Image (cartoon, helix red, strand yellow):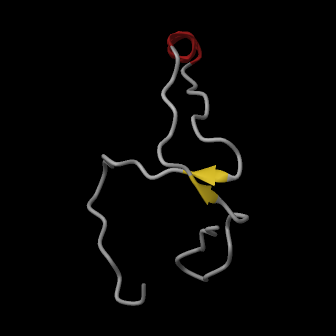
Amino acid sequence: MTVFLCSKCGAAITPELARLAAASELSDGEREQEKKTHEAPSTVPRGRYAIDPEPWGPPYVVQEDQ
């Protein structure tokens, strides 16, 4: 099990979570609903987490205290 912590104070910000191999893909119906509402449905069930194999955004920099 994994718990995510605040990087500033170290407090737990999630309950215990189990890792998924991958997030599920959206169905065609879910994609159409997303286009109408501009809200994407969750692809990760409650109590789980997944790591995106192709992340985007600034590069991750490992900190010395990790």
- For the point 61% across and 82% down, the residue is 10
**Is 62 placed left or right of 37 in the picture?**
left
In which quadrant of the rendered image does the N terminus lie? bottom right
Question: x and y percent of residue 56 in the render?
Answer: 31, 48
Whole-percent x and y of residue 38? Answer: 54, 21
Query: Is 12 situated above or below 56?
Result: below
Front-most of residues 41 and 16? 16
Q: Residue at x 52, y 76 (%)?
A: 7
Q: Name the residue: 44% across, 52% down.
A: 51
Which residue is at the front of the view, 36 or 53?
53
Quarter of the figure with the C terminus: bottom left
* Count of all numbered marks drawn on residues in the image: 0
**Is 7 left, or right, of 2 in this rendering?**
left
In the image, farthest residue toward the front: 21
Q: Residue furthest left?
A: 59
Task: Residue at 70% x, 65% y: name it.
Answer: 16
